[in-house]
Amino acid sequence: MEQMLLEINHLKSYFFTRKGVSPAVDDVSIRVPKGKIVGIVGESGCGKSMTAKSVMDLLKYPGRVVEGEILLEGRDLTKLSAKEKRKVRGEDVSMIFQEPMTSLNPVVKVGKQVREAILIHQKTDKAEAKKRVLEVFREVGISEPEKRYDCYPHELSGGLRQRVMIAMAMVCRPKLMIADEPTTALDVTIEAQILKLIKNLCATTGMSCLLISHNLGVIAQMCDYVYVMYAGKIVEQGDVYTIFDRASHPYTKGLLASVIHLDTPQTGHLSTIPGVVPNLMHLPAGCAFCGRCQEAVGRCRAEKPELYELGNGHASRCFLSIESEAIHE
Amino acid sequence: MKIRKTAKSGPGAAVQETACPDTAAAQQEREALVAQLGESDTFLDKMRRMASDNKLAVVSAVVIVLFILLALFAPLLTPYDFDEMDLLARLAPPSAKHLFGTDELGRDVLTRLLYGARVSLAVGIIPTIVSMLIGAVLGMISGYIGGAVDAVIMRLADVMLSFPSLLLAMVIMYTLGDGIVSIFIALAVTNWASVARVVRSETLSLRETEYVEAARSIGVRDFAIIFRHILPNCIPSLIVLFTLNVPAAILSESSLSFLGIGVQLPNSSWGLMVNMGRSFLYNAPWMSLVPSAAIMLVVLAFNFLGDGLRDVLDPHLKNS
Amino acid sequence: MVKSIGKRLLQTLLVLFCVSLLIFILLRIVPGDAVTTMMGEHASAETIERLTAEMNLDKPFYVQFGYYIRDICTGNFGTSYTLNKPVTELIGAAFPNTVKLALLAAVIAWVIGIVCGVIAAVKKNGILDRIFMGVSLLGVSIPVFMVAMLLQYLIGYRLHWVDISGVESWTGFILPAIALGWNSAGSIARLTRSTLVEVLTEDYIDTARAKGRGRAAVILLHALRNAMLPVITMMALQISSLLSGAVITETIFAINGVGRLAVDAITSRDIPLLQGTVLFTTVIVIAGNLAADCLYSVLDPRIRRGA
């Protein structure tokens, strides 16, 4: 049994707005083993970013964690005091965001911003901290680190900015790095470099990574284990090979089918999943996906399915998957 | 083919109308989108939203309309004549007979307040409309054409803005002599520059939008672009600016009249009333405080309304 | 960057030139002879002729303007018609009072405004927020003369706490400064609150918190640095409105400042004095704007490189 670094158990984070309660994260359980990369994939608005922010306790009003445990090496993060939570942030768990341009303070030099991460958590002097920053800059592949130290964010390219963000996240040697769509805003070639960098860092430092993306290609390349989310719930989970070879949930199958390959025939329609994600405040009575599901049966519209175990860590939130897996066996 | 601009912000986004073939599936999808995103956000919808969210703004609008009506129908509403003097009741404190007391010649303050409202409100609203027209036109031309024209207009605006507004108005009053028309001109001239600046910066950003680029590429004339694309998008900001500039004009006029430079006798305005009441501040404070309170109320009402409008029309103006 | 400063200076000089031209034109189009205004209607024809020649009023327009510019550049603003002293001397005596008044008002207004704005933004939608914003709105809506008179009446007359006019000491400046600054404080508070609220929704605030920064540190070290930029722009604009307000405040509290001089000049039709005071205040506004521009480019690195 692998050692679990992070265990999220039955997490519920809701948004309490004037128009109603929105269950952005509804009973989500995720496990991140030590040294592995775990991916969360899903459409915009499915709750994957909210899950990540819940771990870091960065949810903004009117959202908050309602129920559940977040165990980091056994410690429940939800039960910590504000001061203790602050200590965890940046030191044990760090996060990188999607938009490197807006994620860096535009009026402060990048070197100082990374240095701040050290000075918050460790008692060193500024010169020592600066040295460490330059070291990390080199680690993440920033050329001419001394020159870049004194640059402002708008003077750097997108790829460099993201490297700075990664440096900021790495500098205190966290146990877990949460990457929220780290390459969505970057060019494809830069994306490849950044992903390779993240994978390398995890391999060399033993750091775990929780990678969030809507891009199946990124997930396939990077992750050891995958969770698929839809409308605030986990609808399928499994190791990366199982998910990509033997996806069980119709949503996952739909996602995979919509990816275009080099050998996709040029004639005919592009495969899509019809419809849109339902409004979280007005979810249907049965399965949240039934309105768009090609395989839906009567039961789907009436009952909400549970997450059913399919063996070997593979699970799916679909009535039909139990039956089909039984046939496979 | 109609393409409507999507709302900049807010919970609803205007659904784009196109004339593409309407299959049943597309229709369904559009309805799903509308259900998902909320109904389209036209001007009327925004007003409705403001009315339901911001009761204060609605109350303010009512107050303003009330004042305007009171001013318009003053002769019919006032209990006394404008010049009627009751020498036996000079400097009388507020009572049932004289709701706001009397001045040093026994004239009813309430009556004079209502008559003064005509001048103060007119001087607040009319020059503001004029200055906004001038400012908007110059701003749009300046922003759209750019180059030398822009430089000249902006330098002119800089010159206007270098004067403390009250002093500029004073100098213009000096040049033009007394009279209400002079005040109108003075206030119109002082206020156009800030409007022009705001409209210019909006024009600059609108000029770079893709629909303007598209219009240009199919050969629409510049003049038509300004009128059909840029102006309508400036209107929300202009509306908000209007509600913010009217109180500024009212305050300017009352300051000028207070100093003795604005409205002169036998006309009356709230500012003039405050000035006249100044010498009696200690024994008949109502003479000055009542018109001051009226000014404050109207200004507050416009500010609340302006805030409410700004929240629904153009939150970006918050920083200007 | 030097190039852009140079460009700004040139623009400023151009604006100064246009301003003086405008003042010159506005004050000379007045119908009626300037000399008769000054001397009254009973002056003899000889005196009128002599004075007209002395004051160059018989020369063509552009020549007069030439003399005017020359005079300004040499610091000669002429002699006041009514007070018979050089305008420079009168302004020299008056302007320290105006500066004291405006400075005190500005400091009070800006400090109180920013502090209230920050608190209101941090405690958004709470009681303090509503109170502060309500008072700010009131501040922006009350005419300066009303505050001044109310303060005079309540605190000066009824409560006898401070002097109500005259400025023997610094205490004499407190009431007028409050009256003058009230308006500005309100605007600054509202702007600070709205910019800070917006800045707090930016992504880099999340980054700072993800690093482990506490709430207070995030606001002071990250949010405020960005939120202050528009606020400083507004402060620069307020130099102009503070001077306008000073005109009224000085009149009500009987302070001998440049504003009051200007009012006196208008009512007595004293052209040189009016010219001098208006030109003077305009120069201050222009200088203030230039300083604010430079400050802005120092604080916002994006502007520095012309990005």
Image (tube, rainbow, N blue to C red):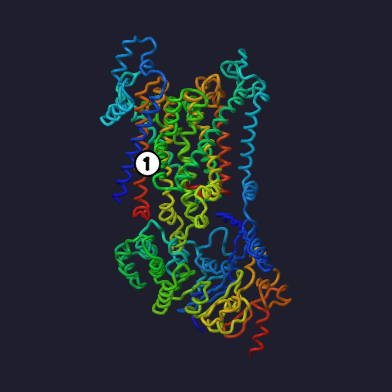
Q: Determine crowd level at label 1: few under 14, some 14-19, many 20+ residues with C-alpha closer than 10 A.
A: many
- Depth check: B252 or C78 in front? C78
Image position of A68 (left or right of C261): right
Compared to residue B281, the image places residue B142 above or below, namely below
Numbered disc 1: what chain? C
Residue furthest left in the image: C74
Q: Position of residue C98 (x, y in %)?
A: 37, 31
Q: Where is residue B94 in the image (x, y as percent from the top left)?
A: 62, 23
Compared to residue B41, the image places residue A322 above or below, namely below
Q: Position of residue B251 (x, y in %)?
A: 51, 32
Quarter of the image where the C terminus of chain A is located: bottom right
Whether residue B43 is visible, yes or no, is: yes
Q: Position of residue C46 (x, y in %)?
A: 31, 10
Compared to residue C189, the image places residue A168 above or below, namely below
Image position of A12 (left or right of C166): right
Residue at 59 percent of width and 28 percent of height: B117
The three-letter code of the residue at mark 1 reads Asn
Q: Say which residue label 1 marks.
A: C289
- Secondary element at image label 1: helix
Q: Looking at the rendering, which quadrant does residue B3 occupy?
A: bottom right
